[in-house]
Image: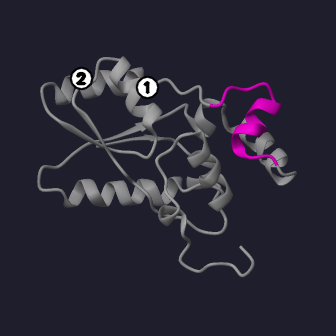
Amino acid sequence: MRVHSICLSGGVLGSRRCECVPQLEAALDRITDDPAGGYLIYMAGHEGRGIGLWAKAATYLLQDAGENTYQANRSLGLPDDSRDFSDAAALLRYFCEGKAIRLLTNNPKKVEDLTTLGVANIEQVKHVCGVDDYNLRYLKAKRDWGHQLGEDDLATEEPTPGR
């Protein structure tokens, strides 16, 4: 199971500052390859953890000046994460009632939000992919904010000298 937030900046505009596109592709592969099947819930309105495309573009300018993704949101007076998972929770309650759910996510807040919205039996399954020099700083900020990412998870395939 994957509850995936839309990422126009990565999926359409080709930004490599995040790992959204590789995560989406890997989730589709994992769901397809699983004999039990699964679901992908693609959440519109979640760009930039809910701040929208234009605000996310503004945060990129602040990130270029040295702030991390969360600091940039706060500098603009925006929340760290304003996504609403109630639609995903409704679908999961309907399609998965009474079943164990293996949720592909590194974000314990997503599990907490879905649980609060009445989704039971969630097992968080680490879903790390697409780590590279373009998004490493972003992923470290996510780790520092609480995402379950270890140092081994953040190793890039081709380390940049001096990093």
Please state the horizontal and vertical placement of residue 32, each as a whole percent of the image.
Answer: 23, 57
Instruction: Report the amino acid beneath label 1.
Output: Phe
Please state the horizontal and vertical placement of residue 127, each as a whole percent of the image.
Answer: 39, 54
Report the span colored magenta. 67-80
Up the image or down, 104 lies above or below 45; here it is below
Earlier-in-chain disc, 2 versus 1 = 1
The residue shown at (54%, 27%) is: 83
Left or right: where does residue 75 sit relative to residue 70?
right
Up the image or down, 26 lies above or below 104; here it is below
Left or right: where does residue 118 sit relative to residue 96?
right
Residue 54 is drawn in which quadrant? top right
Left or right: where does residue 73 sit relative to residue 90?
right
Q: CA distance from mark 2 to mark 1?
A: 12 Å
- Which residue is identified by label 1? 85
Observer able to see residue 12 = no
Q: Residue 104 in magenta?
A: no
Please state the horizontal and vertical placement of residue 75, each as a whole percent of the image.
Answer: 82, 32
The residue shown at (43%, 33%) is: 110
- Which residue is identified by label 2? 93
Secondary structure state at the residue bearing disc 1: loop
The residue shown at (84%, 47%) is: 61
Q: Which mark is residue 38?
A: none
Residue at the far right in the pictured view: 65
The residue shown at (17%, 49%) is: 37
Residue 158 is drawn in which quadrant? bottom right
Quadrant placement of the C terminus: bottom right
Q: Residues within 10 Å of mark 2 (few under 14, many from 20)?
A: some
Please state the horizontal and vertical placement of residue 153, each as a whole percent of the image.
Answer: 48, 62
Q: Are marks 2 and 1 in contact (CB under 8 Å)?
A: no
